[in-house]
Image (tube, rainbow, N blue to C red):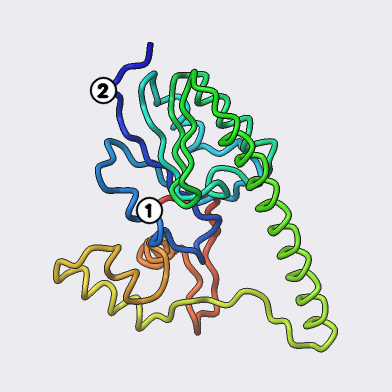
Amino acid sequence: MSNTHGQTVTYLRVSSDTQQLDRQDELREHADRVFEEYASAATRQRPVLTELIAYVRDGDTVRVWSMDRLARSLTDLLALVKELNGKGVTVSFTKERLDFVPHHDDPMSTLLLHVMGAVAEFERSVIRQRQAEGIAKAKQQGKYTGRQPVLAAAQVDEAKARLALGLSKAQVARELGVSRSTLHRALDGTLVLRGSTVGPSRRDHERP
């Protein structure tokens, strides 16, 4: 029998530093533990997700903003929900308003998980194809310059000043229109800045 006093665990994920966790921030409320991941969901072998799965216990609830934050493929999505349910853990998707409870068969929820997961996977495939076509066309026209730095040195100096005044990194990042991970990298000198001629080393899956 599941523990009725389990923890509420939140999983927040974005694929890269150019994306922000802001729209998922509401899930931080009333959470006993928050796991933040800056990594692609193309594979389920993600360090923070692995840590979360090891952490949760029977009776816990894992809250995720949407299905595509947990997995990018229908196969992985189904496998992860099944694995967590197998540990006695409820999986709750806020955007889709779906809860998957252990030992509780709900044919309609299961059907929606399959259908919505498949639709999301198809949409991502179409987006990737359009992006690839757009980049290829831009290259042919000599207009493609690749990903550009999002912050200038002056903005980093301003961020440091505002942090010194007591503002949080989340607040400063929102004001600059970047993610907290991007701000963190800018502050510790590992982010290429606009106008910079020397780029720093890259860090994979860095967390703020």
Q: Amino acid at mark 2?
A: His
Residue 83, image x and y in percent? 56, 24
Neighbourhood count class around disc 1 (C-alpha, 10 Å): few under 14, some 14–19, many 20 upward: some
**Could you say which quadrant of the image residue 115 lies in?**
top right
Residue 140, image x and y in percent? 85, 84
Residue 118, image x and y in percent? 70, 47
The residue nearer to you, when weighing 42 against 84, is 84
Disc ID at residue 5: 2
Indicate which disc, 2 or 1, sits on the residue closer to the N terminus.
2
Q: Name the residue: 57% across, 49% down.
A: 68
- Label 2's element? loop
- Label 1's element? loop
User: Please, is residue 79 above or below residue 96 in the view?
Assistant: above
User: Please, is residue 122 above or below residue 31 in the view?
Assistant: below
Q: Name the residue: 36% across, 76% down.
A: 176
Relative side of 176 to 167, left or right: right
User: Please, is residue 24 above or below residue 80 in the view?
Assistant: below
